[in-house]
Amino acid sequence: MGTLVEPALLLLLWQSVWALDIPLEVRQPPTIIKQSMKEHIVDPKDTMVIECEAKGNPHPIFSWRRNGKYFNVARDSQASMRRRSGTLDIYAKNNPEQYEAEYQCIASNEYGSAYSNKIRLQLYSKEILEPVVVSAGLPLVLSCDPPPGPPKPETYWMSSSFPTMQAVRPDRRVSMGVNGDLYFSNVLINDSVADYCCNARFPYKNVIQQKMPVVVKVLTTRTVAEAAPTWLSPTGSSSSILVLQGEELLLECIAAGMPTPRITWTKDGEDLAVTSRMKVKNFNKMIQIPKASFDDVGEYTCAATNRLGYIEHTITVRVKAAPFWLEKPTDLILAPEENGRLVCRSDGAPRPTISWSINGEPIETADPQPNRQVSGDTLIFRSVSASNTAVYQCNASNQFGYLLANAFVNYPNINGPDCMCLWVYSHRSKYGQGNLEGNRFKTHSNGTLEIKRIRIEDQGTYLCIISNIAGRDENQVRIEIKSFFHIGFVHFLRISLDESNLVITNVNRGDEGNYTCVIKNELDQKSASAHLMVMDRPNPPTNLELSDPYERTVRLSWVPGDSNHSPITGKMQYDDDDWLPGKWRNLSTYPGTLNSVILHLAPFSYYEFRVIAINEIGASRPSRPSTRFQTSGAPPDVIPKNLKGVGTWRNNMEISWEPLTYREWNGPKLKYLVWWRRRDSREEWKNATTKWLKYYIYDADTFTPYELKVQAVNDFGMGPESPVVIGYSGEDRPIAAPLNLRVSDIESTQVTVHWDTVTRGSIMGELKEYKVYYWRDSSQLRWHWVNRAMKSKSFPDDVPEPSGTVTNLIPYSNYKMYIVVANNRYEGPPSNSIHFSTPEGVPSAPTSFRIQQRHLDSIYVDWDLPAEPNGIITGYSLKYQTVNATRGEELRVEEFPPNTTSFSIRRYDRYTRYRFSVAARTRLGLGEWHTEESPHYTTETYAQDQVDITTQGWFIGIMCAVALIVLILLIVCFIKRSRGGKYPGTTACSLDKRKPLKALSWPAMMKRSDSDDSLVEYGEGGEIPFNEDGSFIGQYTGTRRDVRELDFGGSLELHSPMNTIYSLA
């Protein structure tokens, strides 16, 4: 028996990215872990709860959007957000309808933001139903109107006749429709013995909503008239139903008639073949298909017959598909310089579009990063860094729904080695148990374990342990070393004997064949054979060929590969020129028996095709791509949408529309052909071709209606015309003013305004409104100042009479007013101005209310006039009472005349406080009250308020300044005396020593200083004696001089107060 010796064995630890459940100890962006359903139905009588829970490190901060705008939960008194959670609790006791909206939760931390689905909150409420009266034999429909789903609530009807309540049993005559309504093909007299009540059960909340019962009263007649069938649901001769793939398809036909009609079904003109996927229910009135597929597309015809007639209704069923996941993006934890990708693969009919966002911001507007690339439905990262850490949102949407997935990319901040790999021998042998040592064992940098010169004793289980700060994982590898046996075919490491069983691991196509087991001893031997057939994925198709090209189709043929013992279905994929290179999209699926199909394509596009074979085991490798193929062009199929015409100036009109997408061009050089003409005119259509999305018509009459249409054009022809829409040219300024402006019903704060309307032709556009401008010109109190700011109020044209009410006026005021007419762009000239005066009203509250303590035992209050007297003030009312006494004092009221604005009250003790309320009065009554409480005055406070003025710094400063001024004046006086200064007149400071000094009285000084003659007639050298009263002895002694030669400097000193001070000195 030989042994395999000295080969080398490599155990590889492949690097891969797993969807890990990251411990919260690791810093990471937020992840939404719980949220309410997209369609959330609540009862407004209960607390409305919208769930939103998320995890992350740091813990996320939550915020909400409502209808796409920020929802400030803190400022809404009826809404609150739970602690450390984003769940909303809404207590809508008042006006719950305002909370019917679309909500979206945002969980954010420093590493990114995660977004919940958009949650549509809907209310379900009850209404009072009136009794229903119907004649016997006629049909009847009782409406239920349950709230919409999803999931759709289960509806059922109950009938109550005292004292019992039981479910309504459907039969050929009575049916419960898909929409929850209760149908009676004809009413009988016993239908009025009970009340009927609709109930809706919500499975996901285990809640039952019950509508108010409806009373049915059946009127009896002698004979019940028979009637031919008519449709109750659906109505008319045809209808259509659009259902999404995988959803429940319900086809219903309920007919009225007497006697009750019978219902039969056909599909596409043939009798309906009922399959296992289909159920016929409700006495043949309903077809139920739990999961719709594209095989259910077609025309279903239901027929209702009775002995009086026959009717048919055709239901056209179309099947589409909302987006569904093929591969959902998962969270990534990437090491430095590592590569990764987020795959967002979905499908639907029509095929969904994929868009990416970063922390809720579209990736197109986010900061570009050179190592991040969007490749179709894949977001690729190369050599990641910390700047790539964020929460990424993938949105797959088509017209029937959307999918939103959050996935974060985390770049952990790891100190030390990024990852440590350790190999351990986990079974006891000659090596014991623990780390591998020796020259034959080598661990490579990528985690690979190499064993050189392998031996029999090396067999066993090896454990690879990898760890870093984000977590730890391990993987076991078992090695079996086998010798050659007498049977001559043993595959190294894959085939082994387990007692008498032959075990083959990792089976492949090479293992297929006949196997024989031989049992022998010394006397005899036995054998048994078995054929091993290996089922595998099919081989890829080959030799793809294109033929029969047309503008929208081409035939694709191929040679099928080996099925590998399992039936094949085929899947077609294509790559076109507006898709990223190397990214393939699924086109359709075909039975495995076909090898040639006709493909329906878009015109004027480049295509490559490949085929994938699929069986129960899996999908084959894709075939080699076909040759590149271009479909020929064709005229556009799509009509430009949202056509409109609007005037931007008085003589023009801007015609605009939405563009066609590139896939809708169907050919090169797409342009738009615009058509227009005046409405209600016989002129021919005018047209122009443009490549832009707007076209302007000039030299148009003001506000004239035009008929408009548009169509797309390319090099292959013109597309279909749009429906005709009406547009209007621009508006001009109105040329007339409303006449006969007048007022009536004048009250103190409002007035009714009337005017005569203007003619439509003078508006020069579409009448928008009449606007009244008014301002307060003055008060009827002449001394009162008013604000003359102009105000306005608009009145729409839909009022029954040309009148309106102007409110918020100020009483006892004089107003001026005029009115204009306005269109969508301009206002017209003003009308005649009118004057009116408002009568008296009640005044506003008095202003400047003050409470003071002027003495220890009294409180003094005073106030000023009201800011708006609103009339002639006839007096004041003052109410007061204590607020801190042990026994409440009776409220006292004082009345004052209009000229009294103060009051004082004696306090019981120093702790007593008062509450004062004061109001002004006119002849119409009291106005607003102003209320204040007195502060807490104490003896100490009062003592602190009564400060000795002689100790105040400002008083000391003033006294020092006065003393300094007096000192300066005295110094000046002595300086003049020492220099021999001349003083007018004889005073106490006179320098003439030849004459004795005479007493000079103060009145004489004042009289002299007031005399102009003494200045003019004063002689320079002479001395003038005075009488005792201070008058001149002689009138004009000395030499008379010209007034221009006089020295006014000395004479004018008599008029200065300084001279008096000098004289006193």
Image: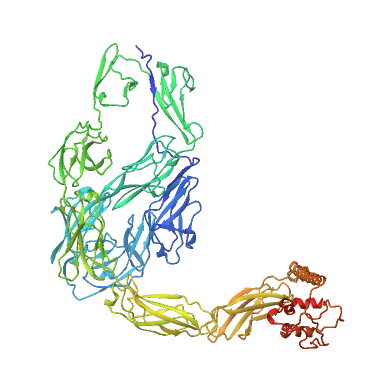
Q: Is residue 445 above or below residue 130?
A: above
Q: Nearer the viewer, residue 290 or 719?
A: 719
Q: Can residue 999 be seen here?
A: yes
Rendered image quadrant of residue 70: bottom left
Q: Is residue 974 above or below residue 638?
A: below
Q: Can residue 284 be seen here?
A: no
- On the image, the x and y values in percent for residue 896 come to 63, 85
Rendered image quadrant of residue 1011: bottom right
Q: Is residue 878 left or right of residue 402?
A: right
Q: Is residue 655 left or right of residue 958?
A: left
Q: Is residue 308 above or below residue 343?
A: below
Task: Kindly identify the residue that appears in the image at 21 percent across and 76 percent down.
Answer: 221
- On the image, the x and y values in percent for residue 361 come to 39, 49
Q: Nearer the viewer, residue 340 or 533?
A: 340
Q: Nearer the viewer, residue 318 or 874?
A: 874
Q: Is residue 331 left or right of residue 643?
A: right
- On the image, the x and y values in percent for residue 640 come to 23, 57
The count of marks equals 0
Render colour scheme: rainbow
Q: Is residue 823 left or right of residue 607?
A: right
- On the image, the x and y values in percent for residue 345 come to 31, 43
Rendered image quadrant of residue 521: top left
